[in-house]
């Protein structure tokens, strides 16, 4: 039968035991999967569904950050170039999607940053 706990609950002690053993681990797993994350990268990558802030250190060479398609990641993204080198950080849309009408956006100076919002109705990323 669906929706029934594995063990019947009879006392407060049973409730706490079920909560600790069966419910809290599931909630913790869901929380870890759904929380947006910040990360620092040093090489080219494609973002995942949990990325929200990406700090790029391009000291060792140019870096390309590829966004997921909007349909797979309707989340606001911030990309920031952290280093002072002349190496560019290029942000490209996933699945051929544009960024404010362009194929890419380039961050070239230290501390340059770009806030990208998925514009689902337009099918592209907007810079804010």
Image: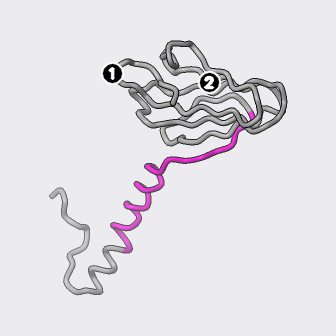
Point 33% across, 21% down: residue: 121
Bounds of the magenta span? 20-42
| Predominant secondary structure, magenta span | helix
112 vs 11, nearest the viewer? 112
Q: Position of residue 44 (x, y in %)?
A: 69, 28
For the residue labelled by badge 2, is the local secondary structure a helix, a strand or a loop? strand
Q: Which residue is mark 1?
A: 121
Magenta span has 10?
Answer: no
Q: Quadrant of residue 103?
A: top right
Q: Quadrant of the N terminus?
A: bottom left
In this rendering, the answer to whether 40 lies above or below 74 is below
Point 50% across, 27% down: residue: 68
* Horizontal side of residue 32 vs 20, given as left or right: right
Image mark count: 2
For the residue labelled by badge 1, is the local secondary structure a helix, a strand or a loop? loop
Q: Which residue is mark 2?
A: 91
Q: Quadrant of residue 81?
A: top right
* Horizontal side of residue 71 vs 47, given as left or right: left
In this rendering, the answer to whether 67 lies above or below 32 is above
Q: Position of residue 120 (x, y in %)?
A: 36, 25
């Amino acid at each position: 039968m669906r929706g029934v706990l594995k063990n019947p609950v009879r006392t407060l002690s049973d409730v706490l035991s079920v909560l600790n053993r069966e419910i809290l681990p599931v909630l913790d797993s869901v929380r870890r999967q759904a929380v947006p994350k910040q990360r620092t990268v040093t090489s080219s990558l494609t973002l995942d569904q949990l990325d929200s802030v990406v700090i790029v250190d391009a000291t060792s060479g140019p870096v390309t950050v590829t966004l997921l398609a909007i349909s797979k990641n309707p989340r606001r993204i911030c990309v920031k170039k952290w280093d002072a080198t002349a190496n560019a950080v290029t942000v490209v849309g996933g699945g051929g999607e544009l960024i404010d009408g362009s194929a890419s956006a380039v961050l070239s100076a230290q501390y340059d940053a770009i806030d990208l919002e998925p514009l689902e109705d337009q099918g592209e990323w907007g810079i804010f």
